[in-house]
Amino acid sequence: QAECMRVCEAGLQLDSRNSDLIVLKREASAAEREGGYMKQHDEVMDHQQFMKQTWSLNSGKLDPGDVQVVSRGQMKKYLRGCSICLLAHKARRLSPESARLWKQAADLGNAEGLYRYALCLQAEVVPASKRDFNFYIRQAAGMKPYLSLGGTKAINIGVSHAECSLGICYRDGKGVDIDVEKAFGWFSLSARHGNGSGMNNLGTAYLSGSGVERDRQKARFWFIKGAENGCIEAMGNSGDVLAQGIGGEVDVEGASTWYQQAIDHGLTQFSVRLKQLKASGSLGVDHLFRENQSASLSEMSAEEAYFQWREMEAKRHRSVDLTTESLAFLLKAADADHEPALRDLIATLSVLPSFMHMVFPYLKRAAELGIREAQMSLSFWCCLSLTLSVLVYLWGGLRCGRTLSLSYHT
């Protein structure tokens, strides 16, 4: 509500008698007193930074296709939804109470309400299916990222987050068929609309060539842009590309700064890299995860471990065989039932003869989680095993019968 008041004040400086702006400012002020400041991002983004971003909308040019011109009544409805979102933020995150409030905001067509309620469905806070999750995410992602009343613009909170989430759905096959090109498209939209996580995922796509031609300079640009917009993962990735000179020259000072920020915000696995960087002034690819790997792995989430594996696979062109080393990260993610990691692990183990014995347990786990490809593969192997067993049994029976027949004639 604070940013809405700021926008209204800017408009009133141009037209002090504009009744629409006067009413909206009064309603925003009341909502702010009721609920306090509503944080826009899941990433690290303080009040001053968010205000600066919103304020800059009215001094810069936006794509007209990204702006929805709203009436006074529509803005009032939007503010009612924001007031409910304020109450939801005060409730315990991902709880039935917060889900009820997010649903109320979603029913008013509020983008953040739609996005947050989808997260509640995904976390099974309330009974739902993947189809329900995708329905609400698509509703939010399909909205315009900016609102305009009387020429004064504001961010439509939640749209860029939903765009990023929809990209993840297409990238990882969550509720939809995997389509890396569509994923890249949604990440591009999210990044263009100012979302730090969207920028980070866009950087990853450019680095690995997922859905787009590989471009290290663009990967470096978007990682740094995402870090500047508060995405914690992008801070660590920015440190990596700067330390290794990916997409540009090596920047030890810049890498150290981003590593430290990532560590300060909880990604302690970057401590090893920062220590090495300060000690030797460089960070070779072969050192990136080799030392203290087990300690780093124990502190990683499944998503982080899977991302690290994808990063290491993207670096294999440097004539460094990282397959065995990166396997530890993939196993970490797969052991936590991370579906994309399970898919990639099964595909990876299938072509490594020394690890073939590990395929079946993970194939069975993936099938139990409902991954269709794993279920079909498991059915095939079970049928093949049964067929072989029958053939062996019949062969044994034939040999036994032949032996008996020879004994009888003898």
Image: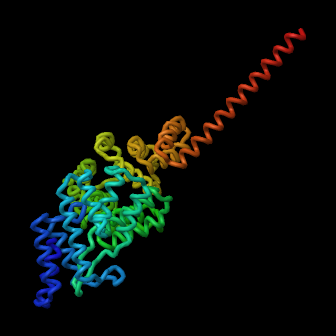
Q: Is residue 148 left or right of residue 351?
A: left
**Residue 358 image position (x, y, % from top left):** 50, 36
Query: What colouring does the structure picture have?
Result: rainbow
Residue 178 vs residue 308, the one in the foreground: 178
Q: Residue furthest top?
A: 410
Q: Nearer the viewer, residue 359 or 206?
A: 359
Q: Which residue corresponds to the image point at 25% horizontal and 51% vertical from the top-left?
A: 95
The residue closer to the viewer here, 220 or 232, is: 232
Quarter of the image that includes the C terminus:
top right
Q: Which of 346 and 14 is in front in this view?
A: 14
User: What is the total number of numbered labels drawn onto the structure image?
Assistant: 0
> Residue at (42%, 53%) from the top-left corner?
129
The quadrant in which residue 22 appears is: bottom left
Residue situated furthest right in the rendering: 409
- Quarter of the picture containing the N terminus is bottom left
- State whether residue 325 appears in this view: no
Residue 184 shown left or right of residue 126 in the figure = right
Q: Position of residue 330 (x, y in %)?
A: 42, 46
In the displayed structure, 336 sits above or below 400; it is below
Q: In which quarter of the image is residue 110?
A: bottom left
Tell me the residue at 40%/68% (across/down): 186
Residue 366 visible in the displayed image: yes
Occupied quadrant, residue 16: bottom left
In percent of the image, x 29 and y 77: which residue is there?
146
- Answer left or right for 206 relative to 295: right
Q: Is residue 119 above or below residue 302?
A: below
The spot of residue 108 in percent (x, y) is 29, 69
Residue 44, position in %: x, y?
21, 61
